[in-house]
Image (cartoon, helix red, strand yellow):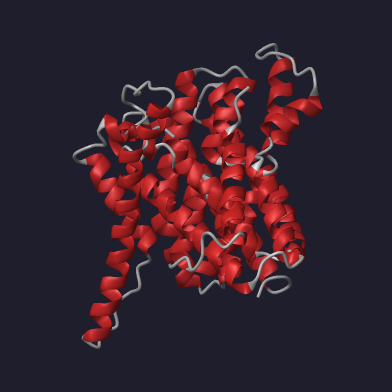
Amino acid sequence: MTTAVASRQSLVVSGPGRWLAMVPGLLALFLIGYAGKVTEQSIAAYGHAHHLTLPNIEYVLWAIVFGLIVSNTIGVPAIFEAGVNTCEFWLKTGIVLLGVRFLLGDVVRLGGVSLACVAVELTASIAVMTLLGRAFSLSPKLTSLLAIGSSICGVSAIIAAKGAIDADDEDASYAIAAILALGAVSLFVFPLIGHALGLSDHAYGLWVGLAVDNTAEATAAGALYSDSAARFAVLAKTTRNATIGFVVLGYALYWARRGGAARVTHTGAFLWEKFPKFVLGFLVVSALATFGAFTRTQMADVANLSRWAFLFTFAGIGLRTDLRRIARQGWRPLAVGVAGECVIALLTLALIAGLAQRFLS
Amino acid sequence: MTLSRDWVAVIAAALLIGLVKLGLVARIPW
C-alpha cells in the first residue's frame, strides 16, 4: 500500500532482531483493534443501560478511524513500521482460517455464482477504465494499471502487473493511491447504500466482494454490515483474486506484443506465480471442515482465530493510509478512479439485484 | 529460497489449526 509507514525509511534488521522489530507495531495493531472492539461494546452497553436505541457501529469502523487519526495526525513512528506492515499477513491468515465457516458445497455453489459475476465485473471494469483512461489522457500503462487494480484485487494486482508490464514506479504509485483512496471512501459509502436498499447479507457481501478493489477494504466493508456479509464478501473477493494470474497474463502478453514489456515464456509458470496461494489454504480448510475434521468447539475456535486475525488487519488499514500522500498524487488518476468505480459499483449492484431473486437469500 | 507471503500465511494458519486440533489452544474468546 502507499501508506503512512511505507513512506518512511525502512528499519533494516535481520535474524532474531527482525522478529523483535515487529513487536511494537504488532502491539499497536492489537491496541487499536481492541480499542475499536471496546468502543463498540461500550456504546452498546451504554445504550442498554440507559434504554437508548443507539446505532450499532461495528468495531471495524472504530479500528479504522482510530488508525486513520493516528497516521494522519501524529503519524506512525518508524519503530512501529515492521509490525504494522504485517497487516497483509493477518488478512491472508484470517482468510485461510475463515475456510472453516464454509462447507465445500457452499464454496462451489456460491463460488460458481461469484465466478459468473466476476467474469461480468472483470469485462466491465477493464472496458470502463480503459475508456476513461483514454478520455482523461492518462498514460497507457497507468490506464492498464488502473484497469487491473479496479477489475481484480487492488494493490496486489497492481504490484503483480507492474513487473509484468514494465510500468513506472510513478504510474504504480498513482494507481495504488487512487485505488486506496476509493477503498477508504467505499468503507463508509457501501454499508450506507446497502442498508438504504435493504440488501440481504448475501447480496450485500457479494456486491462488496465484486465492487471494492482491495481485499482488506472489501473484508472490512463486509464486516461493517454484518458478520455474515463479511463471509460472503471474502468469498466473492477471493474468487476475484483467483483470476489475478489470467488478467495480468493478458496485459503482459498485450504489452509484450507492443514491445513495451518482456515476453512471457512459460504461461503455466506465470499463472502459478501470480496465483494467490492463500486461496488454496482457504479451500483446504473448507474441505477439512466439510469432511468432519473439526469438532464444533474446534470450529468455533478456528473461526474466532480468524476474527482476531481480521482485527489486526482492520487496525492496519487505518494506520497504513496516509491521506495527505494520496492527496498529493494529482487529480486525474483519482478522477478516472472515482468515475470508473462509480460505474462499476452501479453495474455490479444491477447484477446483484438481477441475481437476488434467483440465487440469493 | 524464500517463501512467498501467501505461503507464510498458509503455514501460520496451518500451525494455528494444528494447535487447536491438539487442544493446546482452546476456548478462544471473541
Residue in the picture at 61% in, 52% down: A96
Residue in the picture at 50% in, 59% down: A305
Percent x, y for residue A57?
35, 68
Give the answer, above or below, for where A183 lies relative to A20.
below
Percent x, y for residue A111?
72, 58
Pick the front one: A88 or A129 = A88
Pick the front one: A198 or A280 = A280
Furthest-bottom residue in this view: A51
Q: Is residue A360 left or right of residue A112?
A: left
- The answer to whether one can see residue A144 in this image is no
Pick the front one: A356 or A264 = A264
Q: Quadrant of residue A74?
A: top left
Residue in the picture at 53% in, 21% down: A139
Q: Is residue A130 left or right of residue A310?
A: right
The image shows a total of numbered marks equal to 0
Furthest-left residue in this view: A74
Q: Quadrant of residue B30?
A: bottom left
Percent x, y for residue A92?
55, 46
Percent x, y for residue A1?
44, 34
- The answer to whether one can see residue A326 in this image is yes
Q: Quadrant of residue A320?
A: top left
Residue in the picture at 59% in, 67% down: A298
Give the answer, above or below, for where A82 lies relative to A356.
above
Give the answer, above or below, for where A263 lies relative to A125.
above
Quadrant where the C terminus of chain A is found in the figure:
bottom right
Q: Is residue A60 left or right of residue A152?
A: left
